[in-house]
Amino acid sequence: MLRTAVTLFNRKGYDATSIGDLAAELGVTKSAIYHHVASKEELLRLALDDALDELTQVVSAAVGDDGTSAHDRLREVVRRSVEVLVAHQPAVTLLLRVRGNTPVEVEALKRRRWLDDQLADLVRAAAAEGALRADIAPDLVSRLLFGMVNSLIEWYRPQGTHAPATLAEAVTTMAFDGLLRR
């Protein structure tokens, strides 16, 4: 049911999708849906949690100093962010389209800002270590890194030619090593 709801929300938009639309798509009655969830907004919350929970775990683990360099932890966040996006692409697509029109969306946007802030702190720590250049604002670097990862929703297809691990490594290499010939 959640997967179908996410597909409809992405195709029609959350506001334009009704529980009736979902029931028709699933071939069930609206009351059958309400037996499992209280509202359309609950479905949205579940979908956005699906998009955010694993990424939150990845970032939370990286900001805790485990003895590895901030630079290595930052690279790992970027690599794992790609893997999370690929694994949860429909839900992440939905997350990237929310605008704060409902309390659930407002909460999801707060969580996204927290992720940006944590990543910026990690960028700041990596620059302090001397591993990254310090002339670009950490919050800008954070948004650019997540922006590169998030752009994958526009073109990446699981049945395509790039395996998730290859994609994650390519994004990480581009972000940290650029296109300079070695």
Image (cartoon, rainbow, N blue to C red):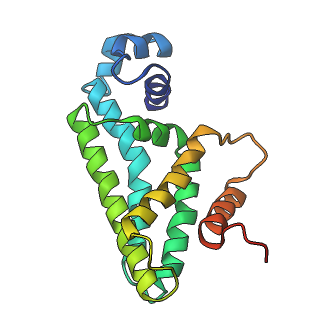
Q: Position of residue 83 (x, y in %)?
A: 58, 56
Q: In the picture shown, does residue 7 fall above or below 18?
A: below
| Residue located at (57% from left, 56% from top) | 82
Q: Position of residue 136 (x, y in %)?
A: 44, 71
| Residue located at (49% from left, 25% from top) | 4
| Residue located at (63% from left, 60% from top) | 171
Q: In the picture shown, does residue 41 fall above or below 161?
A: above
Q: Extreme left residue here?
A: 103
Can the viewer see residue 137? Answer: yes
Tell whether 131 sits left or right of 123.
Answer: right
Can the viewer see residue 87? Answer: no
* Of 32 and 111, the residue lying toward us: 111
Number of numbered discs overlaid on the protein picture: 0
Q: Position of residue 32 (x, y in %)?
A: 35, 16
Q: In the picture shown, does residue 148 fall above or below 174?
A: above
* Of 181 and 37, the residue lying toward us: 181
Tell whether 17 sits left or right of 173.
Answer: left
| Residue located at (45% from left, 30% from top) | 6
Q: Position of residue 112 (x, y in %)?
A: 34, 52
The quadrant in which the C terminus is found is: bottom right
Tell whether 138 sits left or right of 69.
Answer: left
* Of 26 and 53, the residue lying toward us: 53
Q: In the picture shown, does residue 92 fall above or below 43?
A: below
Q: Extreme front residue here?
A: 135
